[in-house]
Image: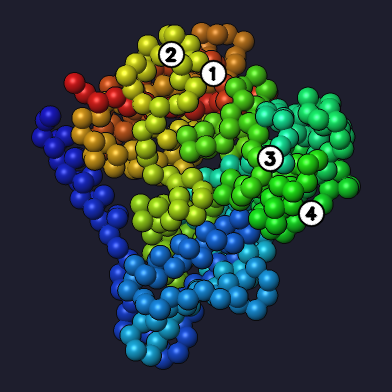
Amino acid sequence: MNIREHVLTFLLLFSSAVAVAAPAPFSDDLKPGDNRILTIHGSNTIGAELAPNLVKAYLRAKGATDIRSAPAGEENETLITGQVGTMERVSVKVAAHGSGTGFKGLKSGTADIAAASRPAKEKEAVLLQGMTDVRSPASEHIVGIDGLAIIVHPDNPVNDLSVEEIAQIFSGGYTDWSELGGVPGPIHVYARDDKSGTWDSFKGMVLGKTHQLIDSARRFESNADLSDAVSVDAGGIGFVGLSSVRLAKVVSVSDGSAKSLLPNKLTVATEDYALSRRLYMYTDDNPANPYVSEFIQFVTENQGQKIVADTGFISQEVKAVVPEYYSELPQDFREITDDAKRLTINFRFYEGSAKLDNKALRDLDRLVGYVNQHPQAELVLVGFGDKKKDEARSDLLSKLRAMAVRRELVRKGIYPQASVGYGDNLPVASLTGNDGKTKNRRVEVWVRQAS
């Protein structure tokens, strides 16, 4: 290792140590009584348990004691409080009425943070113009990964469905389980309500613009209530966040010609699972409230990500995993990844761009931290792409994607052992449509220990 590499390594280790520092204790300028330090509006998926759990851990890390959680008046609203010193209390309010309400709260000033279980819509980006650019890394923060689980009654023999079959079920194209290889009987559809980010995600990923939810669907504001209803209805089928499966049965899902996968830590963390989704918190890109930036940093670092995992979602901590389906992968791919494990991150790019997206930018730092903790690790980057008329072009573009990630890592002092392209093989999503193409254009990270 030359002098430059030593310097870079030192700087990375130093910056890593700074990044994971505990939040600063509360200052002495708190007033007697209740001090509201943060308000979070938005997604029920995030607000039901995850946001309150993150707030409690954050307050505890800042030295608060006697931390309590109680209803805040209206349904799906929670007030978390903690004691600071002998007289002062601090509080954080979480109002979970759907992703759309978070952006409105951010605009009106009634919320410091907008929690969303889907990316900001164009109309929401326009709403917040002049205040913040919600597409920027300073405003858009990915706090965890969720999988939309398709659930049925535990005794239902149907084990896997395609995205198209799910769309047909929820729009009334299929009305009896016998049409899908199940026990004859009517299909009963359960869905989240219109304010839910879970519903927005399902509508975007499954129904799209060509299907409409069947009128007879029962609608729920709560993931947990929906799951409990499906688990006692032999004809029921619904969708919930992965953390809310409870007693229902999960079916595997395929998209186009891609392999049918169950949602689990690897398939959801890498977003290979067809119905995986990111969980977001949006803020002003330069918030006046100092607690906002500190809280977001806490959430996205290891302490917060452990809370994400403990709550039942998929954290963004980097882990090495042997895929359950590894033996089914092509022989030439297994030769590339011989004796290696797959890391629980994929690098993806903005649609129609060679630019890494916001999650990928943050994951670069996570990967650097992983390598610093595992100095014998040898990285293998494998690029993938979508189908082109010219197979050689697909191969070249996949190789260039791997090289683009390698270039960013080298800038941070990390030197992968290899970066290869695997063309349009092993798709994880449909080969048609922009969403499918964006998911297939990815770079996987495999790791082996140097001998």
Earlier in the chain: of badge 1 and badge 4, it is 4
Q: Are marks 2 and 1 in contact (CB under 8 Å)?
A: yes
- Residue lying farthest to the front in this orientation: 155
- Residue lying farthest to the left in this orientation: 3
In whole angstroms, how far apart are the C-alphas of marks 1 and 4? Answer: 36 Å
| Nearest to viewer (mark 3 / mark 2) | 3
Earlier in the chain: of badge 1 and badge 3, it is 3
- The amino acid beneath tag 4 is Arg
- Kindly identify which residue carries mark 2: 333
- The amino acid beneath tag 2 is Phe
Q: Residues within 10 Å of mark 4 (few under 14, many from 20)?
A: some
334 is higher (above) or lower (below) than 16 = above
Q: Are marks 3 and 2 in contact (CB under 8 Å)?
A: no
- Kindly identify which residue carries mark 3: 154
Residue at the image position 45 percent from the left and 26 percent from the top: 323
| Nearest to viewer (mark 1 / mark 3) | 3
- Kindly identify which residue carries mark 1: 426
Secondary element under disc 1, as helix, strand or loop, is loop
Q: Residues within 10 Å of mark 3 (few under 14, many from 20)?
A: some
Residue at the image position 73 percent from the left and 44 percent from the top: 238
Q: Are marks 1 and 4 in contact (CB under 8 Å)?
A: no
- The amino acid beneath tag 1 is Leu
Secondary element under disc 2, as helix, strand or loop, is helix
- Kindly identify which residue carries mark 4: 219
Model colouring? rainbow
